[in-house]
Amino acid sequence: MILFDVLLKRLGGAGLSQVVLFLLLGYYNVPGGLNGLATVFIAYEPDSRCNVPPLDNSTAYPNLTEPDILNYTTPYDVTKQAYDTCSRYGYDLNTCNGDLTCVNQTYPPVVCDKGYHYDKSLFTETVVTEFNLICDRKYLSSLSTSLYYAGMMIGSILFGNLADMIGRKPTMVLTFVGVLGSMFGITYSTSVEMYMAFRTATAAFGYGTTLGTFVYITEVVGSEWRTFFGIGYQVFFTLGYMVMSGVAYNWRNWHDNMLVSTLLSAPFLLFAIIVPESPRWLFSKNKNKEGIKVTKLLARINKVTITDEDWEEARKAGEELEVQIGTSKRKYSTLDLFRNRGTFIITIKVMFNWFVNSFVYYGISLNAGALAGDIFVNNTLNGVMEIGSFIICILFMDRIGRRILLSGMMFLAGIGLIVSLVVNEYKGSNQSLETLSLVFAFAAKIGISGSFGVIYNLTSELYPTVIRSNGVAAGSVMARVGGIIAPFLIALQDDIPWLPNAIFGVFAILAAFASLTFPETNGNGMMETIEEAEIFYKTRKIKSRDESAYGSSEDVSMEKKDIGHDNTAFSSISDNDTKTAKF
């Protein structure tokens, strides 16, 4: 085996070849963003009411305005201070012949027996309007969104080991073909069941593509650049859902929107085909001839020369690493996260924090349409806030530490949500208060996006090498649960407008205080054993140890099981993590 890390020192951690690969492979996260938050637009729910012909026929009743039609036909709910648009007064509409003598508001309400009328001034057609996902079918809209995040869990089961078995490049190509096929399936869906099935498939296949692209990027850059490129990869996701604002603005029918999104995604298939296989993976599988060929190509692009001495050093280092890996007999599982008191407590807090991060992140992001102001502008500004949070993470993560930054970001998210909803409740027609509510909502977006970035790094550093991937995987599962629940909670705002943001805000604040109980990992080396971790949890100090020449705990890489579709899916994993997980 040839140890690629030795060759990477000669190639340079972030040369021209790595930048080109980053741009080509990072492009996949643009489709990731387009799909991840597409429902903000394609599943937009406009104002609606019952169809009430001929009262809503402008030819028969040219003088009736929309408020007039609502008043004459739709019961008013005093408790909610809104019309009950899922019902109408039960008088016989067939008796209406150009005058209003047929109107009788003393009749008991009946469900909309002649279908629904939608306000199509913003979008000509959405999933909600085409499949009537309102009233007694409204739950299907939330379910379809939740199934997308369930699809990620399905993808982790189906494709979790694929990239390690067949390689990064084949995984990217095969799964992205599945993504494209599923996106076309969404575009031409003729039923809500068909739509939900293809949305779920898009997420599942997308997991495999994310896995291949993200792991590939982190494998070919130097350890000192991995956090930077990891965050940079997520910027593509943010750009993707910002681009969706422009697509939705220009194509107001959801079928057209998805077709354009699919066409914008298609170039990645060409990128995945033309890039070479990851040299780190090739060397890990002892495909040295192919690995040497790719490494020499990267060296030419970077304008560096790899000498015979470099190759010999890489071979010796690889042999030493194989010996080290071979000495480890015990296999660890998720159960080991709960066997010892220290790791048990840390795992519970980690799982709670991941759940809250995903729960609140998607709660804010998917609810952009409910914010005051223009939906296209608000979604774009959400992206701007997210990029701002990435910059904050890069600047301060190593300066003030993971624990304080995580807690501060979560606290900002919680307070931003609480203040925003309070101001929104009392704003009335005051434009200044409406703007203030928006400002705090965007502050919450900055907070939760930043905390999502920090929790990945912190989690990987809290666990020792032997159970690190299990720890991050446990947190990632809880993140999926948060993403699945969030759409259903958002749906409650139709009945109690302030409740969703109140719950999101309270959970964020609770997670902020819980985060303060984490030990600080900034500046520490990576732990190797559970015993070492237990000592660290008690003393906040890592037991000193001799580090091998080529397996330094400071040289970190990505574990393939840790990658998801979250907004900042990056983590730091030790290069000698497990026997089966190495590149």
Image (tube, helix red, strand yellow):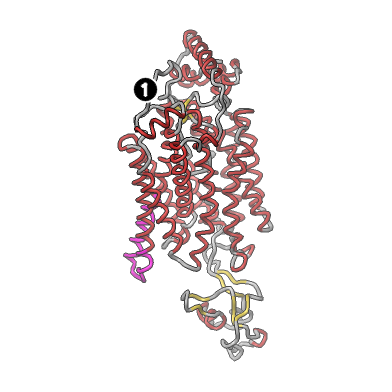
Q: Is residue 402 left or right of residue 558?
A: left
Crowd around label 1: few <14 · some 14–19 · many ≥20 (10 Å):
few
The amino acid at mark 1 is Ser
Check the image and report above or below for 462 versus 318: below
Asked whether the viewer can see residue 14, the reply is: no
Q: At 53% across and 79% down in the image, what residue appears?
A: 70
Give the percent coordinates (x, y) of residue 389. 38, 44
| Magenta span contains residue 35 | no
Asked whether the viewer can see residue 141, the reply is: yes
Q: Identify the residue under disc 1.
A: 544
| Magenta span contains residue 432 | yes
Count of numbered labels shown in the rendering: 1
Give the percent coordinates (x, y) of residue 360. 45, 52
Check the image and report above or below for 68 versus 355: below
Give the percent coordinates (x, y) of residue 560. 54, 32
Q: Which residues are magenta?
A: 422-445
Camera-side residue of 511 and 315: 511
